[in-house]
Amino acid sequence: MIKTPKGLRLHIGIFGRRNVGKSSLLNALTRQTVSIVSDIAGTTTDPVEKPMELLPIGPVVFIDTAGIDDVGILGELRTTRTKKIFDRTDLAIIVSTGDGWSTFEEDLLKEFKERSVPIIIVFNKVDLESPSDELIQKLNNKKHAVVQTIATEASGIFDLHEAIIRQTPQDIINSPAIISDLIQTGDMAILVVPIDKEAPKGRLILPQVQTIRDILDSDAYCMVVKESELRDAFQRLNSKPAIVVTDSQAFLKVAADTPNDILMTSFSILFARVKGNLSEFVRGAMVIDKLKPGDSVLIAESCSHHPITDDIGTVKIPRWLTQFVGGKINFSHSHGHDFPEDLKKYKLIIHCGSCMFNRREMLSRIMYARRAGVPITNYGLTIAYSLGIFERALSPFPGVLEMYRELKK
């Protein structure tokens, strides 16, 4: 569980004013001294993350944040960093004191409600001041989970634990399938894994590993080959595979070597539906037809690795799109949790497979794109579209393929 990637963990954010006991609450929940505790307001300056196993949910990551009411220039910077945590919060814990509930906390409630994020309200330090019966009734009437605690004494922590279990989103407990809904028991899947300069030494990248695990969990088989070995692999099989999944960079060769009666897609497209919204990304990819020389396009990556020669995000996709459009496009790049606040200048956002993000953060970015009126798609769909094999890459997803064909009419 300790080695579970953050992208597969339930992200539980702890929010509230300064000095309401957020850090004490995290320490009580984890039974460890994770965050520094002090009577001085503003002790927590940056988000503090604690991955752990929370039974019976499984792997989670708690995020202790700086007080959102922090003041001054540094306070504004801390508040900005805290608000970025909103984007990847699967479950929000809003901490207040009995006499401290106001429009500030109501605004937090509104923010998470608009994001469809489950909320738990914790009134801490109830040994000093308890919330009024009227306030508790008001929150209960709105169907909010309310817990009262004395974090420094671990009082109420069991109730909070129970509330977390009840409020955990079902898509975390029953995580979306990567490939298991596309294959049956006993099926064979061929995974095409190029070994190039970007392949990590001695191991596979995360989407490839997770896809293999999903296949094995389905009591199916997989064959892992390089793109240069795919034709030979077909000849060695006594029966045809159910599906071929490739790294998007090898799309053209794999499409050429895979018989038309075999489903084919890419790891990136599989993760488009696991981490985001495949239909939304398909609609975004269709905007590629409308791009013109001089347009601005944002390419966003969830990880912050140092790009190398012929990097997919900084070199290959810009090259393929430039060739498709027939002129220079103005490309901007963002990495990690950094994401531009002003998106309106872009004609299209192209995102990586977001294997390092949890689904909530990817959905938040889709939400920002919608608000700005900017289409968003991902690497695999962009590559398939620009190389003219879009329908082939959507073949495993008949519902989405039919939607695309209807939109093209």
Image: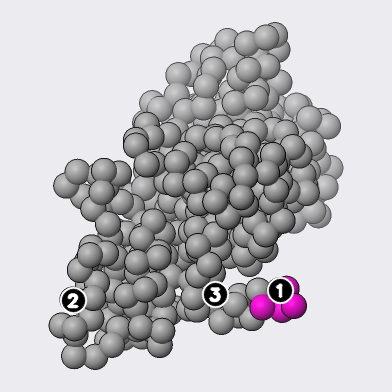
Q: Secondary structure at mark 3?
A: helix
Q: Residue at x 58, y 55 (%)?
A: 324
Residue 116 in the image, given as x and y percentages of width and height: 69, 54
In the rendered structure, which disc, 2 or 1, sits on the residue that comes first in sequence?
2
Would residue 50 appear left or right of 334 to someone viewing this image? left
Tell me if residue 264 is in the magenta stretch: no
In the image, is residue 113 above or below residue 315? below
Label 1 crowding class (10 Å Cα cut-off): few <14, some 14-19, many 20+?
few
The segment highlighted magenta reads 405-409
Q: Which mark is residue 232?
A: 2
Would residue 45 appear left or right of 61 to someone viewing this image? right
In the image, is residue 132 above or below residue 2? above
Q: Amino acid at mark 1?
A: Lys
Pointer 3 residue? 391
Q: Secondary structure at mark 1?
A: helix
Asked whether the residues under the numbered discs 2 and 1 touch, taking CB atoms below 8 Å apart as contact, a structural biologist would say: no
Q: Amino acid at mark 3?
A: Glu
Residue 331 or 220: which is nearer the viewer?
331
In the rendered structure, which disc, 1 or 3, sits on the residue that comes first in sequence?
3
Q: Is residue 290 visible?
A: yes
Q: Which mark is residue 408?
A: 1
In the image, is residue 144 above or below residue 251? above
Residue 209 in the image, given as x and y percentages of width and height: 29, 58
Label 3 crowding class (10 Å Cα cut-off): few <14, some 14-19, many 20+?
some
Tell me if residue 408 is in the magenta stretch: yes
Residue 105 in the image, given as x and y percentages of width and height: 75, 34
Residue 72 or 145: which is nearer the viewer?
72
Q: Amino acid at mark 2?
A: Asp
